Image (cartoon, helix red, strand yellow):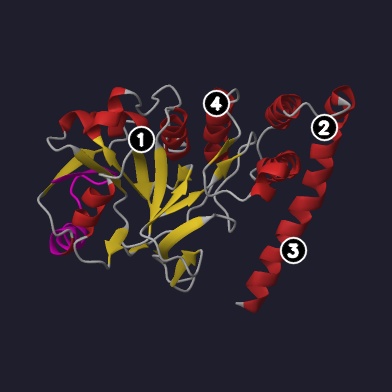
């Protein structure tokens, strides 16, 4: 038996979505629809409310822009949730978390999903990483929030942190909570689902990630048992590279200079980089320089695109 929790921006769930679940889930279930059409809840609050309303012991937090291609996926989830010491199961994740906020990218270590696009701009394709993986589960640390499954009893130890607020970062935070409490999180390879979105991480997305990584600074980095030894040895270099990427992403989203400088300085100190005073002195000029280089390039790309169309 499975409780499917959906925080929806619509008063009513789409009929095709409801029908697809009914036709493919293959187990007794309930839909716990959290109507958030008036955005009165953060995603954290909505999911906590959903947990309270569930009548079954197995939970599935699910986005509403998905379509299941596998039959009996509910049965498979329930079976996976009987794995000893299981925490959270999903379909895309990473087997380590560093000290610096990082968005989902092509370097995810475990992925099993069909990525699509509502507008049909990008081609639909199935992502399978590793490509030759044969087992039904692969251990990771973090999971994408498109689908997250767990037993209700682990909410005696963890919960969605409503102090973070908004609609981003909840998947990072709840998965880190699970791992810190000694549970193992997994990517599921025997369930095929399609996600009709590619995401668009905006400034609020990175602000939420920064809150999460600040919260867990004393627990990071975290590694799953699947992580390669080379990653562990190179984690310092990965963090330094991640800091540069974070700076670029914040600049590209036109976040305030003082905000960028504060966060980059904070994570520089967390990593205990050399010459912190020099880094703090040069950070604002560096941001202004990046802005000067980025926006003309952005305009050039936009004009090129308009010419091609």
Q: Residue at x 39, y 65 (%)?
A: 118
With respect to residue 91, does 301 lie above or below? below
Q: In what element is the residue under mark 1?
A: helix
Q: Nearer the viewer, mark 3 or mark 2?
A: 2
Sequence-first disc among 2 and 1: 1
CA gap, disc 2 and disc 4: 24 Å
Q: Residue lying farthest left?
A: 28
In the image, the segment drawn in magenta is 1-23
Q: Earlier in the sequence, mark 3 or mark 2?
A: 2
User: Can the viewer see residue 15 in this picture?
Assistant: yes
The Cα atoms of the two marked residues, 3 and 2, are separated by 26 Å
Label 2 neighbourhood size at 10 Å, few (<14), some (14-19), many (20+)? some
The residue indicated by pointer 3 is: 300
Q: Nearer the viewer, residue 83 or 218?
A: 83
Spot occupied by residue 28 in the image (x, y as percentages of width and height): 9, 51
What is the spatial separation of the Cα atoms under label 1 and label 3, in whole angstroms? 37 Å
Between marks 4 and 3, how big is the CA–CA gap?
40 Å
**What residue would you read off at disc 4?**
216
Q: Which residue is mark 2?
A: 283
Direction from residue 289 to residue 36 in the image, left or right: left
Mark 4 crowdedness (10 Å alpha carbons): few <14, some 14-19, many ≥20: some
Q: Mark 2–mark 4 contact, CB under 8 Å?
A: no
Q: Residue at x 68, y 41 (%)?
A: 246
Q: Earlier in the sequence, mark 4 or mark 3?
A: 4
How far apart marks 2 and 1 lie (CA) works out to 33 Å
| Helix, strand or loop at mark 4 | loop
Q: Residue 149 is drawn in which quadrant? A: top left
Q: Quick check: marks 4 and 3 in contact, CB under 8 Å? A: no
Q: Is residue 218 above or below residue 96?
A: above
Which residue is labeled 1 in the image? 43
Q: Are marks 1 and 4 in contact (CB under 8 Å)?
A: no
């Amino acid at each position: 038996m499975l409780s499917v929790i959906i925080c929806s921006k619509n008063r009513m769930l789409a009929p095709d979505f409801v029908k697809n679940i009914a036709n493919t889930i293959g187990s007794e279930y309930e839909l716990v629809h959290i109507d958030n059409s008036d955005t009165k809840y953060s995603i954290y609050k909505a999911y906590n409310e959903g947990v309270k309303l569930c009548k079954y012991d197995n939970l599935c937090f699910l986005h509403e822009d998905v379509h299941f291609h596998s039959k009996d996926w509910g049965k498979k989830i329930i079976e996976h949730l009987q794995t000893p010491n299981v925490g959270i199961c999903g379909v895309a994740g990473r087997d380590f978390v560093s000290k610096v906020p990082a968005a989902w990218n092509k370097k995810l270590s475990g992925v099993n999903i069909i990525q699509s696009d509502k507008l049909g701009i990008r081609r639909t394709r199935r992502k399978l990483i590793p490509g030759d993986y044969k087992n039904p589960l692969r251990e990771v640390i973090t999971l994408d929030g498109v689908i997250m499954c767990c037993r209700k009893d682990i909410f005696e130890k963890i919960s969605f942190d409503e102090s973070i607020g908004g609609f981003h970062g909840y998947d990072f935070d709840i998965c880190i909570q699970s791992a810190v409490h000694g549970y193992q999180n997994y990517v599921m390879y025997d369930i095929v689902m399609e996600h009709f979105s590619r995401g668009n991480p905006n400034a609020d997305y990175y602000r939420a990630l920064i809150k999460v990584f600040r919260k867990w600074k004393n627990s990071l980095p975290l590694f799953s048992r699947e992580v390669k030894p080379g990653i562990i040895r190179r984690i310092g270099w990965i963090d330094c590279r991640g800091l540069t990427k974070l700076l670029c992403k914040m600049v590209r989203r036109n976040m305030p200079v003082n905000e960028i400088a504060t966060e980059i300085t904070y994570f520089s100190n967390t990593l205990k980089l050399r010459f912190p005073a020099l880094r703090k002195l040069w950070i604002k000029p560096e941001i202004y320089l990046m802005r000067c280089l980025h926006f003309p390039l952005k305009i050039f790309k936009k004009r090129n695109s308009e010419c091609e169309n």
